[in-house]
């Protein structure tokens, strides 16, 4: 039989304020910051090894946990719990054990609800801000570790990823490095399945090993070298599709660099926006600006025209044939700056043709990575832009779908990802506007 222990007097009001069902707050002990508590002795703990009820108290120790009071507006929301915990010994097998509680993970120094609070706050605030909120009770690095663990647990409990006939690997600019997006295409809809912070060959190999690739018939990718390299190695005979919008991005990059050099001293606001916009989309009020910029800069004007020509092809009944003609004319007549891009397009004409045969619209996939890059630039760095996205989408119920009576994870519709990022941006503007 377990020995009966005399329990101390209970402070009913503070027990209610604490709101942890497994704990009682001790009367006449602690203060507004320190809550002395002990677990309810409502059951006799059984030995986890042999299942015997014949256990006795082995040791009593105080466990200190950081906690946050629920629904309290006072400044002292953050408290410290001093819990009198007991370990037990089994009389039969001599096993010593400590019962597990719902309110905290076995080795943690924080309650679960405090961990949840930190993760939730970190989605829209920087880690140092969150750390400050807790009066530096937890360091930024501590919060980062917490989030990483939280993300891993979440990811670990997810159903397997569903990869249909089309797998899509795209890169995007993630602060200083290139990040990798794993997308799947199902019935013409694009789903974001996972995000990685880098595109190193090792990361990609690990990733592809984890995916069930048996059904994959085609891969959509951009021109990133490490992606191409690993694809050739892991899926050597797969149809590789290239969204020709990728080439528009490359041309725009060159246009941007050239414009930066040539218009450095030009006192026109928004000039860059105008230059980066295809002619058809330039507002009537800005047409004059565009003409002024291009008038005395024949080199820039030439690259602008060629870029604009590519946009026209891609946005109006594009075909591989029209694109190769565009590239061939650059090879013959320049501009020299764009010849490597034109050559690359011609080298990949087959891949572009595969894309055309699949009936996919141009610039569809290239715009996904472009938008994600955009949000990554816009959003305040919370030092884990990637994890943020991860947290947001792993946590949504619509990542789950059922097929053939088994459960698979398809990912989040990419529109929904952008919607969430837009909301996050608004939320951040709210937080950081004084
Ligand atoms: Zn036992």
Image: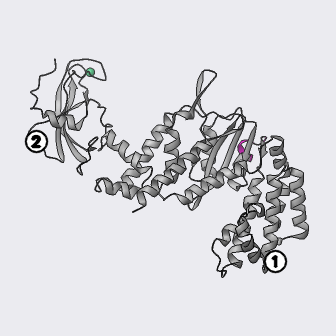
Q: Which residue is mark 1?
A: 298
Q: Nearer the viewer, residue 21 or 189?
A: 189
**Tag 2 near tag 1, CB within 8 Å:** no
Q: Is residue 199 visible?
A: no
Pointer 2 or 1: first along the chain: 2
Q: Is residue 266 above or below residue 133?
A: below
Q: Position of residue 59 (x, y in %)?
A: 17, 33
Q: Residue at x 79, y 40 (%)?
A: 237
Give percent across and percent down for residue 194. 58, 43
Q: How crowded is the residue under tag 1: few (<14 C-alpha within 10 Å), some, or many (20+)? A: few
Give how far across and how far down residue 24 sits, in percent: 18, 32
Indicate yes or no whether the magenta region holds residue 335: no
Split into 4 quadrants, where in the image is the C terminus?
Answer: bottom left
Q: Which mark is residue 29?
A: 2
Real-space Cα distance between discs 2 and 1? 82 Å
Residues rendered magenta in the picture: 232-237
């Amino acid at each position: 039989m377990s020995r009966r222990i005399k329990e101390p007097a209970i402070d009913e009001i503070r027990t209610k304020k604490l709101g942890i069902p497994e704990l009682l707050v001790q009367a006449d002990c602690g203060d507004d910051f320190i809550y002395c508590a002990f677990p309810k002795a409502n059951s006799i703990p059984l030995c986890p090894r042999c299942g015997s009820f014949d256990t006795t108290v082995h040791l009593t120790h105080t466990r200190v946990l950081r906690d946050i009071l629920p629904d309290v507006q006072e400044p002292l929301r953050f408290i410290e719990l001093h819990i009198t915990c007991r370990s037990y010994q089994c009389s039969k097998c001599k096993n010593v054990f400590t019962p597990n509680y719902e309110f905290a993970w076995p080795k943690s120094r924080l309650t679960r609800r405090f961990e949840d609070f930190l993760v939730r706050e970190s989605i829209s605030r920087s880690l140092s801000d969150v750390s400050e909120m807790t009066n530096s009770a937890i360091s930024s690095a501590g919060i980062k570790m917490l989030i990483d663990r939280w993300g891993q647990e979440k990811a670990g409990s997810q159903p397997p990823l569903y990869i249909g006939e089309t797998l899509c690997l795209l890169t995007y600019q993630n602060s200083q490095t290139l990040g990798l997006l794993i997308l799947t295409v199902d019935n013409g809809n694009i789903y974001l399945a996972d995000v990685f912070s880098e595109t190193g060959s090792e990361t990609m190999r690990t990733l592809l090993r984890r995916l069930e690739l048996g059904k994959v018939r085609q891969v959509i990718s951009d021109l990133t070298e490490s992606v191409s390299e690993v694809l050739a190695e892991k899926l050597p005979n797969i149809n590789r599709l290239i969204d020709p919008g990728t080439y528009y991005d490359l041309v725009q990059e060159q246009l941007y660099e050239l414009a930066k050099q040539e218009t450095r001293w030009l006192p026109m606001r928004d000039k860059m926006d105008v230059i980066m916009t295809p002619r058809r989309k330039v507002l009537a009020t800005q047409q004059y600006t565009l003409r002024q910029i291009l008038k005395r800069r024949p080199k820039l004007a030439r690259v602008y025209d060629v870029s604009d020509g590519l946009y026209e092809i891609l946005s109006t009944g594009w075909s591989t044939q029209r694109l190769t003609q565009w590239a061939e004319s650059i090879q013959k007549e320049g501009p020299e700056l764009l010849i490597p891009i034109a050559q690359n397009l011609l080298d990949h004409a087959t891949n572009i043709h595969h894309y055309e045969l699949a009936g996919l619209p141009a610039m569809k996939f290239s715009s996904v990575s472009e938008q994600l890059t955009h949000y990554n630039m816009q959003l305040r760095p919370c030092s884990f832009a990637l994890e943020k996205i991860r947290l947001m989408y792993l946590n949504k119920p619509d990542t789950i779908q059922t097929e053939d009576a088994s459960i698979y994870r398809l990912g989040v519709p990419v529109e929904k990802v952008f919607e969430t990022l837009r909301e996050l941006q608004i939320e951040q503007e709210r937080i950081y506007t004084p």
